[in-house]
Structures are given as structure tokens and as C-alpha cells.
Amino acid sequence: MTDTTTGRLDLGDLAHDLRTLMPNEWPHPADFPAPPTAADRQRWAEADRAARPERLAKLRQRMAQEGVDGYFGLRWEHMRYLTGLPFDEAEVSGSGESGKFLVGMQQVWLIADSRYTIAARREAPDTTLYEIYAQLYEFWGDLVATAGVKRVAVEAMTIPHLTWQRLQQAAPDVELIPVEGWVEDQRQHKDPTELERVAAASAVGDRALAGLLPSIRPGVTEIELALDLEWRMRTGGADRLAFDVACLAGAEAALPHGSPSRRPVELGHVLLFDFGAQVEGYRSDMTRTLFVGEPRERDREIYRLVAAAQDIVFDRLWESIPAAQRGAAMPTGPSLDQLARDVIEADGRFPVYGHGLGHGIGLATHELPGLGKRSPDVPLPRRTVFSVEPGIYIEGETGVRIEDLVVVDVDAGRMDRVTQFPRDEVVVGI
């Protein structure tokens, strides 16, 4: 609702039940779900094995529709999704040609050298191992001949132009078709057990930040807090981090993507954390902006406006689910992004965030669906998970971002904020 005397939105109607949490009201790690058990992890592994034939069937259906008989994959998250071999970014840089794969209409060939052959046989037993000890272009002719493919879709966004040319020269009778988005589109439609793992990774972050709160005090540095938070995630159920921890104090919080330094925390300023964990390959992503000492009124106003921009998106999502159950389309990512921007622009006092409102998350930290101005203008999937992260950044002064992961499941009538750490104004350092 807009106040006709000021032209500003009444944030009380949007930032629902926002409170100021002092130390005696802080969340405790025990408030959040416990780490997954060995039985949980085993069940998730079995679910992935059971899902892979259908995942490959969907890809092969797309291949048939597009008139190709092979699909050459280079992205590690696609390899894990379709074959089971668990690479990630940390491994890719030193893996050489290992970790690529070729999907035919009947078989899947997994490319690996001796460092990965044992893991490939164990983790991807339904694939055919193609052992390599050379550059891709040197064995490409034999690989496509072995697979019997003549028209191959290639993940063109991740292959160098020179490599593409060399593949063409190595097998001139094989046509290479540049594609993108085929597997990405599949992966945005999450299975229930995939959503469970995102929620488990989110709970790791919730517990870690709750445990860190007593350590935040004036004088401690960003880098010390970032390391402490990382340790708490790694010892609290995470297999690894989703990405490096961002901890930004005061004016540095105006950097949407910044790195912690030896800058000390000071009273009267904000402290922004952006971090995530991995559990069985699936990731979380969370941003919280805390107040060190008594909040300055301007910072508090910014915080409430950002919360209001987030709330209006939550409300729109919740309202859309009954309509979607009756056959209506879900909202698009760009429309939700504009909805959040409208809240900040209507207030008129602060700049609107320049990044997108959010992104899908799963095996990669950033994946489909996209919630930004330039994202595909298509309805959100009926079952998926994504971030909602509006922000306001004032260079040289302050910055506020609140980021939560949201699960939408139309058929289950569900819209949950799986990041459970409170969005309230949390005061630390006193």
C-alpha cells in the first residue's frame, strides 16, 4: 500500500513480522534440522541411480527430435547428473580430458584416464569406460567411430574454438552441432530427493551462521569470520563449500560479490555474509546482512525495504500455486524480478540492485531457472528451487542483501523458504 502523503510504500504491509533480534533472542544451531544420516545419503544415492535411465531417455528423446545420434558433454554437473561420476569445479581444472562423456542412442561412453578409472567403474557402472591418454582431438576419431555416431550435438558454450576445429579435422565425416540448454533445462525440474539435498545443505548454513553469532564482535576481521564460518560448515555436515565465503563489513557490503580481507568489524555498521554448503553434490546459497551494534536508522530503513521487495515475491509465488493447480502458468522469472524492483523504485530513496533477483540452484550454484531481466521469459517449472535475493548497494557507504532459497512444488501445493535462518534484524557485537 502506498502512503498518499509521502508516495512511499507502507513497508508494514510487506515486510511481514520483521523483528529486531538481540543476543538473548538469537537462533541456536539446534533450532535447525540435524545433518543428514548415512541412511539419508544412501537413499539419495539409490534415488539418483534409479533416476538416471529416465534422465537419459529424456535427453535421447531430444536428440531424436533434433536429428542427432550423439551428445557430447563437457560440463561436470551434466556428467554427474547423467552418469553418476561426481566431479566438480575443484577437480575439473586438473582433470585434463577426463570427465567428458558421449551419449549415444543405446550407450554412454565415459572418458577417463587412469586417475579416474576406478571411480568411473564404481560410480558410473552403467556407462562404458573409454580410457584415454591423449588430447581430445587425438582420440576423437576413434571415439565417434566406436560409438557409431555421425551427427553429434556438442555443448558449445564450454568448448574452445580451436578444439572445435581440431575435432572437425579429426573426423571430417562427423557433423558437429553446437547446442546449449538441453540438459540445463532438464536439471531445473528437480526430483523430490534433489530438493531434500538442497534443504540439507541449507540447514548446514543455518546451523553454521547461528553458531558463529557469538564470535562476531568489534575488531574481529572479515577473513577471520569467513574462516570460522567455513570451518563450521565443513564440520557441521557439509561435504565441501558451494563457493568461497563472502564476509563484507561496513561500506564493503556495497560490493555484490566481494572477498573478505583483514578489515575489522566496527560498531554501527552492517556485516554481510554470502555463503553456501554442499551435501551429496547439491548446494545452498544464503545471504544475511547483520547489524553490528545498534542499527543506524538509514541502514534499518534499507534493510526493511529489501525485506519488503523479497516479501512481495514470496506473496506472488504463494498466490500463484492454486492458480497453477487449476492449469494457469506459473509466473516468469523476469516478472518476479520486476515485481521486486518496483518496490524499491516506488520508495525512491535508494538505487535498485543491478544483478538478477535470483537463480536456480542444485548441482551448480547458478543454474536454471533464472530470475532476472535477461532471463528466459518463460513460466517457472512446477517443481524447482531458486534464490530470491534483492539488494540495495550504496558505494562507499553500506549495502544490504537478503537471500533465501525457495522450493516451489505446484502439485504438492508447496512454496517453502528452505533457508530457515531468520530474516529478522539480527544485532551482533554487543
Image (tube, rainbow, N blue to C red):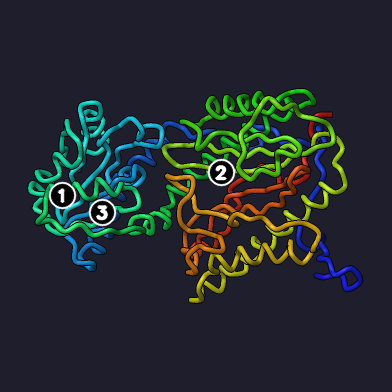
Element type at mark 1: loop
Query: Element under label 3?
Result: strand
Distance between mark 2 and mark 1 Cα atoms: 35 Å
Query: Dot 2 corresponds to which residue?
Result: 285
Residue 293 bears which disc, if any?
none
Residue at image mark 3 = 154
Counting residues from the start of the chain, the first of labels 3 and 1 encountered is: 1
Which residue, given by chain and number where applicable, does mark 1 sit on? 107
As drawn, the residue found furthest toward the right would be 5
| Mark 1 neighbour class, 10 Å CA radius: few under 14, some 14 to 19, many 20 or more | some
| Amino acid on which the number 2 mark rests in the picture | Asp
Q: Residues within 10 Å of mark 2 (few under 14, many from 20)?
A: many
Name which residue type carries label 3.
Val
Label 2 with label 1: CB-CB less than 8 Å: no
| Label 3: few (<14), some (14–19) or many (≥20) C-alpha neighbours in 10 Å | many
Q: Do residues under tags 2 and 3 come within 8 Å of each other at their CB atoms? A: no
Left or right: residue 370 versus residue 180 is right
